[in-house]
Amino acid sequence: MLVLQILINGLLLGGMYILLAQGLNLVFGVMGVVNLAHGAIITVAGLFTFWFATHTQLNPLVLLPVVFVAMLAIGALLQRSLLEPLAGVGRKSELLSLMITFGLSYVLVEIGLDVFGSQYVSLPNLQTTWSLGGLTINEALVAAGVLGAAISGALQIWLQHTDSGKCLLATSQNRIGAVACGIDVSRMRCIAFAIGSSLAAAAGVLIIMVIPLAAQTADSLTILAFVVVALGGLGDYRGAVLAAFVLGIAQSAVGYYGGGDAESVVPYLLFILFMILRPQGLGRAAQAQ
Amino acid sequence: MSFERDTLGRQPRNRLTPAAAAFPSRGLQAYRAVAGLTILAVLAAAPLLSSGYILQLATDILTFVALAYSWNLISGFTGYVSFGQVTFFGMGAYATAVMVLHTPIPWYLAIPIAVLLAAMAALLLGAVMLRLRGIMFALGMLGLARILAVVAANWSFAGGAVGLTLPAQLTPNAVYAGAWAAALIAFGLNAFYMRSGLGLSAMGVRDDEGAAQALGVATGRVKILTFVLSALAPAAVGGLVAWNRSFIDPTSAFDPNMDLQLVVFTLFGGIGTLWGPLLGTLVLMLVGEQLWAYVPELQLALYGGLVIVVVLAFPGGMVGLANRFGWLLRRPIFAPRSFPAAIVPPPAPPSRPPDDTILEVRDLSVHFRGIVALDALSFDVRRGESVSILGANGAGKTTLFNAVTGFVVPSEGSILYQDRPVGGLAPFQRARQGIARTFQIPRLMESMTVWENVLLAAQHGRLSRRALEQTAWALHITGLAPMWLESIARLTPGQQRRLELARALALAPTLVLLDEVMAGMTRDEQEEIRGVLRRLPEFGVAAVAGIEHVISAIADISDRMIVLDHGKKIAEGAPAAVLRDPVVIQSYLGEVR
Amino acid sequence: MTQAIFDRALRPLALASLAALLLCATPAKAEERPIVIGGSVSITGALAVDAAYHLHGLQQGIEDANAQGGWLGRKIELKYYDDKSDAGTAVRLYTKLITEDNVDLVIGPYSSGITQAVAPLINKYEKVMIEPEASVPDIYVPGNLWNVQGIAPSLGYLEGVLPLAKSHGAKTVAVLALKSAFSLACDKARLEQVKALDMSLVYDTTYALPQPDFSSLALAIKNAQPDVVVVCSYYPDAVGIAQALQRAGYAPKFFAEAIGPAEDEFTKALGPIANRIISNTSWWASLKTAGNAAFIAHYKATFHQDPDYHAASGYGAIQALGAALNAVKAIDQAKLHDWLLHNEVQTVQGTFANDPNGAARKFNQYLFQIQDGTRKLIWPLADAEAPAQIPYTGQ
């Protein structure tokens, strides 16, 4: 029973990780850009949700679609102005884009600090706990997990079964080939970044009901998301799901048996281990670059 | 190496009047040395004479200068962006503090030992992490700082989360001197890289790591060495800061904002340049000091915004801007004052039996996840032969070259070079043993001049002892001597291909693999290249294999032709016979009308 | 190689050295008439929210002292810089305040961590410094003479919880602590107290921030079924652990968290979960300490918010400093320091008194509880505003 509870906690935690990480995968797979501002987007969206909820008394879930759409526009704008000029092949452009998102993350964090303050905030919605035969399951984590799964599923379907999605997939696998097929690669990049950052923002709206967020810890979310994505294999969506669950269960188990300190080291330790032993990650598909 | 050190930049500016003078006069030399040292002494002494605050500020500036230069070394020169300076900083701080607190080792020994420990850690880390792609490396280092912070927070021997309070040793003058030393060392390393073959190799890694390997650069070793060198100054400053502050804890030792500042300072000054980190740090810290008093809540945002602006608008930073006016230009490495007048061709190698097999390919198969690129291919190339490899696009020709040079691992079969198997040898080792190649799409080093592109190969080739002469010769023979100091961007496509050839020749190779060297050339250029190709045996090249589509250009200089189709050999023999073979005509040449 | 470098660099270096000389040649500021108290404050950064209260307490204290004629017949001024919640910056700022701005007196920064970093500096320059926001005992040792603690030590945080719980029949205890200077000191004291009171420790662990999820810890706590859960926390983990316990479906009879429940955001973040959580304070509005009512009234009028204990300790520090100055009648660091160590001052916090190492020895610790959205003092019983509501239900 205990083990089952640990497992369930781990799975739910993994669901939350998927939510955090898939947006990063999309951006990286198509653009070769690791969006270091990912955590900042999540955090600012979450802080905004908190502000909204405490000032308007409306259910913050209302914000989910609103923030998603708004971030599509903002993300597209950011991509056009900041990342498109650098879009090229090769390591140089990859790393320059890394720098830009690095700088962007600090700008966003500072905006978050100035507008929303430096205090940790969270929302008390979704606090129902269901009890199923001795197991306790919490609404917030379930919501995060369900949304995470839904997003991953939708992403997979879109990428593999729709025309626009296939174009995106094609672009990520072979840029020149995609151009040769008549795909507007530049537009693909814009779409990828817009959707990737919208996913992050949506994650933020939900996450603020699960854990407290503060502007200054945005980069720890980036690193966490990156660890999930790296463990799964950069750009591999299915791998990321597997990695998220592995991470969630590992943390849950280690936290129970080993205490709080051991738990906090788990993501980083796994990361280093994988870097040494299996840098291509858990996923079967190793992306050609 | 005999070359003159008093060189001129890309746009020659002669400060001394007589162009003939090899060195400035002794008097001028002495004057310059004294003037330089005096200025340094004044800069060093000034803060010592003023208030404690200025001294503290100067120490902080020097600390960041040292850190920025170290970052420049790994990220600017090799292009492997590292967010790891803070990791070594923290390591140095903690190692020093723990040593001083728990062992009888005094401060002035603890800091160098900490530096040594950091260097060893860098060696281990580099060996593991530099195998990864640039992005993974960058993020891995980012995560590492976190891990170390957590480890430090949990390790009560190192003070845990509470931190370590050290016996107050507040001697700000000594710390200031230490910071100077660290900054000078970091600067010195950068200056060395700017002037040395190692630096040239590092830049090759940055511009095109794969191509650099084909030119004989041991990229792995270069990266690791640079990484280790980049860890020295941060560890030293970490130890100094611990000493200065008498208190360290995980948050202050592994402060992630430190990396941001380094990146901003160096980018703003000019990444990969000699003066960039210094200028960037000086300007931004002095300006920042005043600015933050007025808008403290915008500091991070402004830094972040500055990174964005610099990367988008002027990625070369302040130095890049200055370069447009002709200031602070980088001097090409080991470039003499003028193109050598006397060209020394490579000596002919000792004579060998004429029937030597230079290259033997046996049942070579290469599979790419379901696609068969090469299918049980066998052929050989003997000494003195010039073999042309033909076939339609996708026939497997370039894959063949990639397998021979080590860029692709065969799924089956073997390759023997001079009767020894090459499997297991890395690309750079094969290049050094005498296998040179050109690339179908020229992969030239964009941040280097023509001269340096060729020198990169020459210094790793068979005749590396006389690399400068070899470089001059290779340029001369491919007709590129007039543009030896041009940047790559100024070359025509034909000139770029000739540069590819010059690089291959600079290695003084035994086997040359040419990948469509005639493509895009004018008739005259083709004639020049054909002239070079005919003379290759004089220069020690034992055999040539060339992939070619411009058949008319190579038909009469090939001894043999091999035609590939879908990875299989479909014809082999004398050019006349092969070109009339109906199978070849059907698969590749097309119907004769 | 050197030749080539100097060749190119001569002009820029010459300009740079000229600039350096000019920079260093600025004369020191002339001394001004008012008494200047200098310090760094975390205006930005992670500690900004609480430090704001601290700053306002200082400012209100100075304003009130000026209204009564100042000290030694001179007005008082506060000179502060933003240390961005960073220890290194604070060190540099205090050096600046002491050596360049030549302030008359120094006052401590916000948080134990930053104070620890600055303490050696204070000793070196031999300035007496009252530290109203440094509750760790580690600073107050022989060798760190010039530091004077201005707040109740962290050892005493939540010290009332276990006796209170025991008096209601509780037997088993779980103790959790954040890995930071303050909370580890608190943790150690609570663990010792469990032994001293003959209660049984069923679970204890430490954790570090940032920790996104406490569900494993909550599960472990639930498994141990303690009557009392004590968390030596800061704000974010206070919220996180409370949420996690609720999700795990466990409510201990007594649930106490050190820092966090005092903030408004806490009740907003947790909603009904926060009800009946117990927490710590070294000051409360209902206490009848010296000048408390006036302090609260003036503070509200100036800053349009209620003061909290950070503000009170800032204010109290100014009160103590003023008393010392008026007794010694000169700005003599050694004499002021000596007077503070040997005399008691009544401040809004209670009795400001220190032991020979500078640690505070007479401040009381109180417990308050969140009851239906308001906060009430529940312990010690003599000062209680309302009885404790037991048990904690998480609703």
Image (spheres, rainbow, N blue to C red):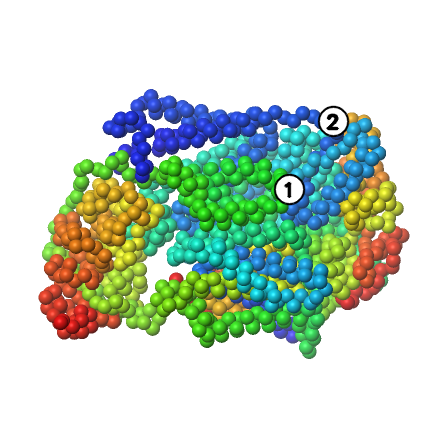
Q: Residue at image x 49%, y 48%?
A: B309
| Depth order, front residue of B249/B505 | B505
Q: In which quarter of the image is the C terminus of chain B?
A: bottom left
Q: Where is residue C14 in the image (x, y as percent from the top left)?
A: 45, 27
Q: Are marks 1 and 2 on the same chain?
A: yes
Q: Which mark is residue C33?
A: 2
- B72 over A104 or under it: above or below: above
Q: In which quarter of the image is the N terminus of chain B?
A: top left
**Number of numbered discs visible in the structure rendering:** 2
Element on which disc 1 rests = loop
In which quarter of the view is residue B363 placed?
Answer: bottom left
| Depth order, front residue of B416/B188 | B188
On the question of residue B502 being in view, the answer is yes
- C166 over B93 or under it: above or below: below
In which quarter of the view is residue B515 placed?
Answer: bottom left
Amino acid of disc 1: Asp
Q: In this view, does A275 lie to the left or right of A51?
A: left
Give the chain letter at badge 2: C
Amino acid of disc 2: Arg
Q: Position of residue C1 (x, y in %)?
A: 35, 33
Q: How packed is label 2: few (under 14 Cα within 10 Å), some, or many (20 or more)?
A: few
| Depth order, front residue of C296/B247 | C296
Q: Is residue A190 left or right of residue A258?
A: left
Q: Nearer the viewer, mark 1 or mark 2?
A: 2
Q: Position of residue A197 (x, y in %)?
A: 54, 62
Q: How packed is label 1: few (under 14 Cα within 10 Å), some, or many (20 or more)?
A: many
Q: In this view, does B5 lie to the left or right of C212?
A: left
Q: Residue at image x 12%, y 65%?
A: B575
Give the chain letter at badge 1: C
Element on which disc 2 rests = loop
